[in-house]
Image: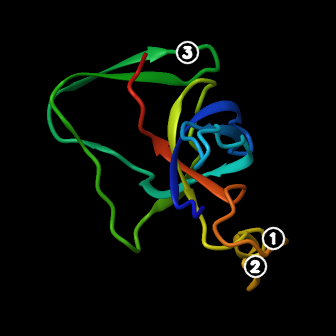
């Protein structure tokens, strides 16, 4: 059986590493549930976020917070965020947060991705194509329950 994409239920997930165990919600040709996928990696996103924001209109309330800074609340108007490609921005790495029971989509890579995720050419440790243990969690797909 060739696996390409599967809908799975999250059994365990570590938000620090972005790695978890997921259970496919499908059966094989004999009607047996497919085995748990251990150490599936969550797809992460790197975004460029501007360091400055501009309030075009309206007003902002400043509230003191314990560390000596201030909290800002926009009461009216709209905040416009923009940046130039070569402007003052910062990269932010977003790692998804999943919890036990979440229904997610997992994509199965052509080959074991152990080498590829380290930037090396190779097929990792497994020689089996479309091995379900080479799964990448791409996002939530289930209904909230």
Report the mark closest to the observer, 1 or 2.
1
Quadrant of the image occupied by residue 32: top right
Which SS class for mark 1? Answer: loop
The residue furthest front is 30
Identify whether 14 is placed above or below 100: below
Q: Which residue is mark 1?
A: 126
Relative horizontal placement of residue 142, taking residue 68 as reference (left or right): left
Q: Which mark is residue 65?
A: 3
Residue 134 location, x and y as percent? 69, 60
Q: Which mark is residue 123?
A: 2
Mark 3 / mark 1, whichever is N-terminal: 3
Which SS class for mark 3? Answer: loop
Report the mark closest to the observer, 3 or 2.
2
Identify whether 116 is placed above or below 70: below
Q: Where is the N terminus found, in terms of image quarters?
A: bottom right
CA gap between label 3 and label 2 equals 52 Å
| Front in this rendered view, residue 94 or 120 | 120
Relative horizontal placement of residue 7, taking residue 32 as reference (left or right): left
Residue 34 location, x and y as percent? 65, 43
Residue 91 location, x and y as percent? 53, 59
- Residue at the spot x=63%, y=67% of the render? 130
- Whether label 1 touches label 2, CB < 8 Å: yes
Mark 3 / mark 2, whichever is N-terminal: 3
Relative horizontal placement of residue 136, taking residue 37 as reference (left or right): left
Q: Where is the C terminus found, in terms of image quarters?
A: top left
- Residue at the spot x=51%, y=39% of the render? 104
Q: Residues within 10 Å of mark 2 (few under 14, many from 20)?
A: some
């Amino acid at each position: 059986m060739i696996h390409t994409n599967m809908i799975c239920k999250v059994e365990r997930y570590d938000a620090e590493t972005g790695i978890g165990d997921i259970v496919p919600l499908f059966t094989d040709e004999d009607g047996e549930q497919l085995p748990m996928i251990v150490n599936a990696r969550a797809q992460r996103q790197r975004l460029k976020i501007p360091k400055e924001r501009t309030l075009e209109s309206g007003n902002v309330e400043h509230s003191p917070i314990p560390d000596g800074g201030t909290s800002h609340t926009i009461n009216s108007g709209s905040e416009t965020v923009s940046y130039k490609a070569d402007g003052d921005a910062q990269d932010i790495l977003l790692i998804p947060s999943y919890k036990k029971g979440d229904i997610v989509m997992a994509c199965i890579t052509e080959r074991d991705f152990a080498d590829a995720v380290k930037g090396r050419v190779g097929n990792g440790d497994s020689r089996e194509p479309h091995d379900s243990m080479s799964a990448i969690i791409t996002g939530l797909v289930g209904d909230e329950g």
